[in-house]
Structures are given as structure tokens and as C-alpha cells.
Image (cartoon, grey):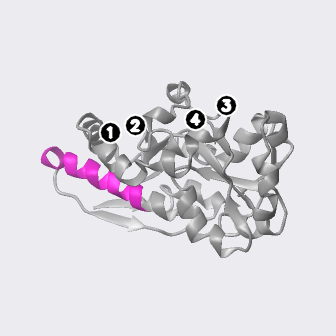
Amino acid sequence: MVDLWNGNRSQIRQVYEKEVLIAVLTATEDDYGPWEVSETLDEYPGDEEALVFSERGHDLFVTIAGNQKFQEVDKIIIPKPMTKNLLGYKVLIIREDDSVKFENISTLEEIKQLVNGIPLTWSDAVIFRENGYQVVEEGDFDDIFERLENGLFDYTAFGANEVLSVYENRASEREGLKIDQNILLFYQFPLVFYVNPDLPELAERVEEGMERIIDNGELDTIFNRYYGDIVEKLNLNKRILFELDNPLIPDEFRDLKPDLDNL
């Protein structure tokens, strides 16, 4: 039994990340034995996420490499990105009344004059601040769009792998919000498995499984099934690109650069 914590993330991420785990376990079944996934979708407050292993007892979960919430947490990191760097391509959700303002942005100075709303404890807040962007960091994922609607900040940003799902399942419930069509932000933000440090054999299995599904093309197959048309769907290659540096990223991922042709 493998206990996957899959809460505190968008619905499409939950489905995708569970499917990758299933592929990993299937690819290693002959060597490591039969398996079953127990999925927990509980939402933990930001200050409790760090207890996911020590108090909640989960076996593994997926998060960004270098996530500051888990900086002091014992864990085993599997350094194999599962969605390329798609989460690092950030698309904005804005108020419809501000559409013209965002359509006319063409310089870094213009976007930096606006305020980005980010939930408490999200690593994105550190990244944006370190790059000179204005940030309001408060609340949580559940109330971010209510606060955007009420004008407490100018925009909020989500990865290209989840922005459509986030908009459909959450933002569209608020009045007058839309996905911006002009701007694309980028920083290194790969998603990787974090494994309970008490389960080194599981970590070994997950790393071996990731290597196998990367080498045999299965990870690409899964990625393309979910995101193969994402560049066209979001017009990513027609947007103005602003690149940020992620000061939290481990060195092995620092060379990630924007490459829309490889998505």
C-alpha cells in the first residue's frame, strides 16, 4: 500500500500526478512487487503541510523542487521532473474590467507596477519579491479569487498545466474574472516526488520507476495526453515572455530555460 497525499493542489494536478505514480509503480512491479495506491485529498493549512510525513504519516507527495515549506523537513527528493517545467510557465487570471490594461503591457516595468495576489506560504511569493514584483501574500487557495474580484490586487498567476482547470473549477465561480491572453511569466518550477525519509526502498522504487517511464517514453505519453496541445490552447508562443529567476531552486534544476518547442 502506497499512501499518496494529493491535497492542496488543482484537480488536474491531482489526476495527473496520481497517474504518473501508478505508471511508476507498474513499471517496477516485477522487481519490487505488487502495489496499491491509497490517495488522501485532505486540504492542510499551509503551516501544517510540513507535517505531512512526521504527523500525518503519508508516504509521498508531489511538490516543486526547492519548496521552502519543506526546507527543514526530512525527506527524500526524487530529482526527476514529471511535467517538464510546465508549472513554471505562469499565466495570469485578471478582472475582465482590466483586460485592456493587460493587453497593452509590453515592458517589464509595466508588469512590475501591478500587484500579484499569492496565498500565504506559497513559494511563488518569495520568487516574485526577489525579482522586484509587487506581492500581496495572504489568504489561501480557496479565497484567492474572491479577493481578486474585490480588487485587493491586480492579478494572480498559475502554471500552464493547471490554469484552465483552476479557472473552470474555481475562478469562473466569481464574477468578472478571465484568463489574460497577453503575458507569460517563466521561472524554474519543476514538480518532483518527495518521499517519506523512513521509506528509502519506496524512494528507490520511485526513482527507478521514473527513470524507466522517461526512458521508454511513457511519461511523454502521459504528458501529451494531458498537455500535448497546451501551447496552442493557451497561445503560449504568442505571448510576451517575462523571465524570472527562482532563488529557491536546487542547483540541478537551475539550467531550466523557457523552451516552448519542447512542450
Real-space CA distance between mark 3 and mark 1, rounded to the nearest whole angstrom: 27 Å
Real-space CA distance between mark 4 and mark 3, rounded to the nearest whole angstrom: 7 Å
Q: Disc 4 marks which residue?
A: 188
Real-space CA distance between mark 1 and mark 2, rounded to the nearest whole angstrom: 7 Å
Give the residue type that dot 1 points to.
Answer: Glu
Q: Quadrant of residue 28?
A: top left
Residue 66 percent coordinates (x, y): 57, 38
Picture quarter with the C terminus: top left
Give the residue type that dot 3 points to.
Answer: Asp
- Tell me the element at label 3: loop
**Camera-nearest residue between 50 and 180:** 180
Q: Are marks 1 and 2 in contact (CB under 8 Å)?
A: yes
N-term mark: 2 or 3? 2
Q: Quadrant of residue 148?
A: bottom right
- Any mark on residue 207, and which? 1
Give the residue type that dot 4 points to.
Answer: Gln
Bounds of the magenta segment:
15-32
Any magenta on residue 16?
yes
Q: Residues within 10 Å of mark 4 (few under 14, many from 20)?
A: many
Q: Disc 3 marks which residue?
A: 245
- Tell me the element at label 4: loop
- Tell me the element at label 1: helix
- Any mark on residue 251, and which? none
Q: Quadrant of residue 170?
A: bottom right
- Give above or below for 11 relative to 53: below
Q: Disc 2 marks which residue?
A: 80
**Camera-nearest residue between 96 and 64:** 96
Residue that appears at 56% across and 70% down = 169
Q: Nearer the viewer, mark 2 or mark 3?
A: 3
- Give above or below for 80 relative to 140: above
